[in-house]
Amino acid sequence: MAGREDGNRQRETPAGAGPEWAEELLEHLRPAGRDVRRVVAWLSGAVRGSVALQDAAGNLIAGNRLPLDEDLVTDIIAGRIASAAWESRERHLRLVRVEHPSHACVLAVSRETPFDRRASDVVTHTAQVIELLLTARESTAAGHRLRRATSDLRLAILQLLMVEDTVAARRVAAGLWPGLLDADTARVYVVESGPAERDRIAEECLDSTGEEALVVRCPAMDGHVIVVSPRDATREALRSLVGRHPDLFLGGSVRQSLARTATAYGQAVSALAVAHFRPDKTAVYAERTHPERLMDPVALRGWTSRVLRPLDTLPHHTRAELLATSRLGLEFTAVNAAKVLGVSRNTVRARMERVEGLLGTDFADLTVRAVVHLALNTQIGLPDAHLASDTGNPGLRLCDLLSGPAVRTWAQDLLGRLDADARNPRRTLRTWIAAGGNAERAAQTLGVHAQTVREHVRSAEPVLERQLLAAGTDLYEVVLAHLAVGDLELPVFHRHD
């Protein structure tokens, strides 16, 4: 059938084929072309008119605003009529109801010439396409909101575990993931990818673990995905994932109680650094000999009770908050600890300053940080009642704990690894620790360049098999070794030692 002489001549098509405009309209349903604004712009050109798509409140969604009769629009929005036509000498107007998952919209088309059959069909079918696009967009947006809410919930559970509130963490998790945290122990894994790939890798982690693990996009490191799982099968699932992607690395902790999730996280991060040098790009934290395991456990608990006793006068929730924040603040930077906890870095610093004041000490001193870190990691395994009442030998001091033969032998063996280096990195490391980890101050004491200090400390890391330039368990163990052999002075607290 020949087209009308209205400036939009319809081309002839083979028998059984639709008009060309229909094919163009269907193109807008392809994944690459799903844009309501583009469809409205196309409609304007197809009918040679002005088009407006507005919602029930009169907000313009796409196109150009047109003068419309409010009563007529209200009738269409309310569903009393599905479409309407209006004309004058200057213009011809068509209004069509467009369904929307949450509310109806109005598609208005204005032309200078009357609407012929072709133009009417184009408007009608375009309204149907817009309905599909709006529905798809709403579904996509709803899916995105659901995924975001679920992701936020996983992060909230992780943050509760990080501050040892396992009861609340289990309560929150039970609603969506029954049984996820029923076990008393779990391992923590950190999967490292490029920041741009992190969201996709997080989804693959969820698929690989069958949603039987807590998968969280790390709030502190853009390329990290944290996985907390009580299941041993999770390790192999994540190793398989890393094997399929050339740019992924995996670090894992040893099994820890849920209350020690923060400790397990630190272990996973430490293992991740090792994974970068492994052919299979994976590593699990090595269960090496830790100094606290060489100390008399009863004496260690008694000493811990006395070190942290100034906090016992605080309300339970305040004390728990300060202990958990300090533990993370000593393990990581204040900025990263704040991101993990979901608070500001000023809040982290204020809480740690309060602990400093209560303990009568200064966290700028690495020996203080190491000693308090030892107490905090001993405390985490003790019930509050036990901690408050276990005084042990009231005369026992830190030097007594560190002077035991097993601890001294461990310390001498560890630091003795550095003696073979003619550059004397052991002296550099000792001076650097005494200077609070400040390379410039250590360099002034030694009479060398600050870069030399950094190189010596960095070269000691593979020899000692510990990270030193990043604060955390590895560094504090090396500090304790220096204290045990007498290379550094013991820190002073206002109530003990």
Image (spheres, rainbow, N blue to C red):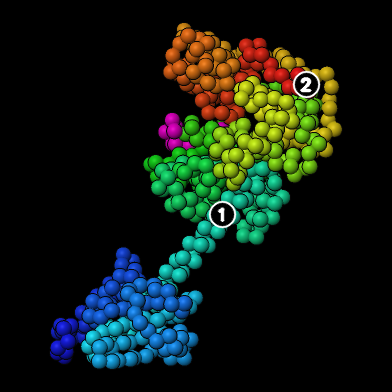
* The N terminus sits in image quarter: bottom left
Amino acid type indicated by mark 2: His
Front-lying residue, 400 or 51: 51
Amino acid type indicated by mark 1: Asp
Q: Secondary structure at mark 1?
A: helix
* Farthest top residue in view: 422
Residue 294 on image: x %, y % = 70, 22
Say few, some or many: other residues with alpha carbon within 10 Å of mark 2 (under 14 / 14 to 19 / 20 or more).
some
- Asked if residue 360 lies left or right of residue 285, the reply is right
- The residue tagged 2 is 496
Q: Secondary structure at mark 2?
A: loop
- The residue tagged 1 is 152
Look at 42% across and 71% down and name the residue there.
136
Magenta residues, start to end: 276-285
Magenta-drawn stretch, dominant element (helix, strand or loop): loop
- Asked if residue 119 lies left or right of residue 142, the reply is left
